[in-house]
Amino acid sequence: MRDRVEIELDDQGRLVLPAQLAQRLGLAQGTTMVVEQETAEATYIRVQTTAPLLIEKGGILVISAVAEQPLDEVLQSEREHRLDDGCMGTQPCESCLIPLF
């Protein structure tokens, strides 16, 4: 069964959820919600379940990510690659180019 709750915008343009609904959904202050408009008639609001890739810190956009392996291992591997392949110039070799997306 699908729940349906009507909510309204307050005088400052914010959506106000009834406290009981927020508790039932496990929402707390600071929870990020995402609004997605699928069609002109269908707009959905959902909880942001994963951290956004880009976040702003001190006015600068930075990538927020979890390392797949310890940083010291990544640095050591990169140093060995550069020494082995002679990739020490200002332009990286083809194997050094990493697609971001």
Image: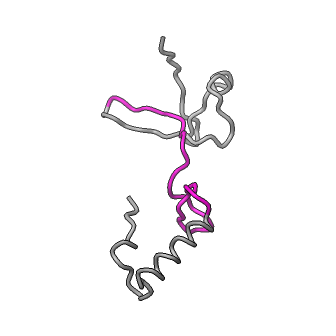
Percent of width and height locating residue 72: 63, 68
Q: How many marks?
A: 0
Range of magenta residues: 41-70
Would you say residue 42 sits in the magenta stretch? yes
Q: Position of residue 17 (x, y in %)?
A: 61, 29
Residue furthest out toward the front: 84
Single out the residue that lies furthest toward the bottom: 89
Colour option used: one colour
Camera-side residue of 31 and 88: 88
Considering every residue shown, the one lying at the far top of the view is 1
Q: Residue at x 49, y 40 (%)?
A: 34
Query: Is 29 positioned to the left or the right of 14 in the image?
Result: right
> Which residue is rendered at x = 51% and y = 16% of the image?
3
Residue 91: image x %, image y %? 38, 84
Is residue 4 one of those drawn in magenta? Answer: no
Residue 50, by quadrant, is top right
Front-lying residue, 74 or 40:
74
**What is the quadrant of the C terminus in the image?**
bottom left
Nearest to the observer: residue 40 or residue 86: 86
Task: Give the residue drawn at x 30%, y 34%.
Answer: 39
Examine the image and state in which quarter residue 69 appears: bottom right
x, y (%) of residue 7? 54, 26
Please, is residue 65 above or below residue 7 in the view? Answer: below
Does residue 23 appear left or right of residue 54 in this picture? right
